[in-house]
Image (cartoon, grey):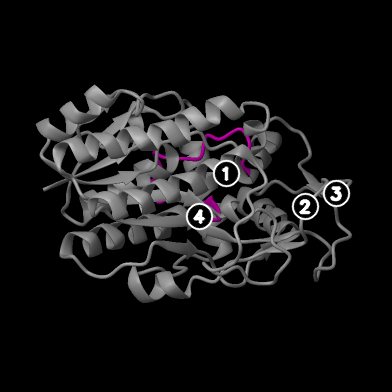
Amino acid sequence: MTWLVTGGAGYIGAHVVRALVGAGMRTVVVDDLSSGFAAFVPTKVPLVRSSILDGASLIETIRDYDVTGVIHVAGYKYAGVSVQRPLHTYEQNVTGTATILAAMADRGVDRIVFSSSAAVYGTPDIDLVTEDTPKAPASPYGESKLIGEWLLRDQAIAAGLRHTSLRYFNVVGSGDPTVFDTSPHNLFPLVFEALVAGRTPRINGDDYPTPDGTNVRDYIHVADLAVSHVAAARRLDAGDTIEPAYNLGSGTGVSVAEIMAAIAEATGIEFTPDVAPRRPGDPARIVAAGDLAARDIDWKMRHSLRQMVESAWAARTASSGL
């Protein structure tokens, strides 16, 4: 039995692959390396360089490696940019997911763990997001992830697919010094690159109705997230009951100002962030309850904010040659 990880050469996917390997589960990676790195894939894990849009290649990979389940992490993940590139976003995230499901059906593979997103909720005006919170995605990216969940639901009805979707919030940190977040849009890389370049990081708004005036968000460690992917895969392998979707959130959240202070301490670079005006539509607080995931798929916050920042900075400095 082998689990196929799409996007397994990316930041999140590579951590999922390591967690699977650590659990003794056979793994193969499919990644076109458009945003991932071959060096992120462990040497003993096969890497098939191919697009998730290539159905024939997916069928061949599933056949050649005796794949019995898929963890689908690949996709276009830039929510803000998706507004300018909606067709590309839908092609990668909707057509890509449909192509994977078709390849699975062709080879009789009936279990999948889907990398979804908090973006399916949009900007809910509530203190704590649960899986039942109404879905109101505010970008093509969020819409594409919600459609992905619908595709799984409908294929389950049509063909008995067993599935779950894991809705990530803000994924940070590193569980391996050779793997780091390379996104040009995520907070940690943006702040790190500003500091390395001698620029002052920026906060968007400090007058929100929060304890320190800055946005409160849910930040989770990537290695903690990876553990829950393994637990979900094992649950599907065992035929156990599983929810269609789980939030991976802290239940509390941290503020942007707290993150800036933690980054200054971890990097040893003292700075006072510049304060820019609020971004339109940015809510004061988005925090998720992870109770269902804690019950079923071994979800817990194993890392403190300091550990998240320190591990991310250590990986960034150790792997800066990529």
Q: Which residue is mark 2?
A: 282
At which x and y percent is residue 172?
Answer: 53, 51
Callout 4: few (<14), some (14-19), or many (20+) C-alpha neighbours within 10 Å?
A: many
Q: Which residue is mark 4?
A: 168
Callout 1: few (<14), some (14-19), or many (20+) C-alpha neighbours within 10 Å?
A: many
Is 33 left or right of 215, judged from the image as shown?
left
Report the residue at 69% width, 38% height from top: 195
Q: Which residue is mark 3?
A: 278
Q: Secondary structure at mark 4?
A: strand
At label 1, the amino acid type is Glu
Residue situated in front as seen by the camera: 271 or 98? 98
Q: Earlier in the sequence, mark 3 or mark 4?
A: 4
Tell me: residue 134, above or below residue 182. Answer: below
Whether pointer 3 and pointer 4 mark residues with C-beta atoms closer than 8 Å, the reply is no
Q: Nearer the viewer, mark 3 or mark 1?
A: 1
Q: Secondary structure at mark 2?
A: loop
Tell me: residue 320, above or below residue 314. Answer: above
Magenta highlight: main SS:
loop
At label 4, the amino acid type is Tyr
C-alpha span from label 4 to label 1: 15 Å
Residue 229 can be seen in this image = yes
At which x and y percent is residue 170?
Answer: 57, 53
Q: Nearer the viewer, mark 2 or mark 1?
A: 1
Q: Which residue is mark 1?
A: 143
The range drawn in magenta is 168-186
